[in-house]
Amino acid sequence: MDEKIKTGPIMKLGDLQRETSLAQAEMETSQQKLLDAQDKQVFHEKKKLEYSVISRDLSYEFRAKQQRFIRLQINLKNQTDLENLAEEEAQITELKEIQPTFWQILANCLDRLVEDNKEKDIDLSFTPNLKSSNMLVTLKGLTDVRHRGNTPEAVEVFEAMSVFNNLLTDICRDQVRGNGFNASKQKQLKQPILHLLNNPRIKSALSIS
């Protein structure tokens, strides 16, 4: 059963025409607002899509530049570390060159060794005359690869030289880095030389009792 439309008082024709015209104008205004809003929505959705593509491309570009920056930063650090290390090693080498050498300290130890033997031994007319200079020549000869550089005695000398060099390098490195003087490390410099001179093979080669 159809529902009857309730109506108010019957309007005059002129009033009805005005109301109709006003309603039409309001409807058209509302329609235009709707169309404008829809156009803006389409525009912004299009822009959103455009910016989404731009954002994606910029994201790829950023990551590529970021990775390049990180690689360059690592390379820069490595290169800086290498140059600093090279500079430090140059300073250490320069400092080592003005320090007493292995052979100089060995010569001093041999001098003391000869003096100690003179004090301990009875000096007979036929007692072998130990000379530190001769012993030094003998030890240097052991390291001459043209002669007997591969003998067990030579290995002992080379080992003592290596330990001495490493100790001296550490001491000079501490000095270059500003760590200050270390008396205990300085005393350790003689240890490989003293150990060498107490080696039975070396004592035999030098005719030391």
Image (cartoon, grey):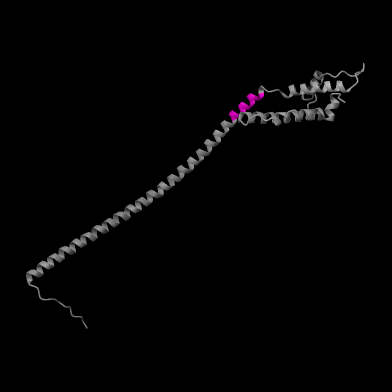
Relative placement, left or right, of 37 versus 129 is left
Whether residue 87 is in magenta: the answer is yes
* Residue that protrudes farthest toward the top in the picture: 125
* Residue that appears at 27% across and 56% down: 40
Farthest right residue in view: 125
Report the residue at 34% width, 53% height from top: 48
Q: Residue at x 74, y 21 (%)?
A: 104
The x, y position of residue 68, in whole percent, is 48, 41
Which of the image's four quarters has the N terminus? Answer: bottom left
Q: Main secondary structure of the magenta part?
A: helix
Residue 187 spot, x, y in % from top left: 73, 29
- Look at the image and give the residue range highlighted in magenta: 86-96
Q: Is residue 133 above or below residue 87?
A: above
Q: Looking at the picture, tell me which residue is in the foreground, 111 or 59.
A: 111
Q: Position of residue 202 (x, y in %)?
A: 83, 27
Disc tally is 0
Q: Is residue 150 visible?
A: no
Quadrant (top left, top right, bottom left, bottom right) of the C terminus: top right
Magenta highlight on residue 209 = no
Query: What is the residue that sits farthest to the bottom in this orientation?
Result: 1
Is residue 28 visible to us here? Answer: yes
Residue 201 occupies which quadrant of the picture? Answer: top right
Position of 202 with respect to 37 (left or right) is right
* Residue 27, picture quadrant: bottom left
Question: What x and y, as percent, mark residue 86?
Answer: 59, 29
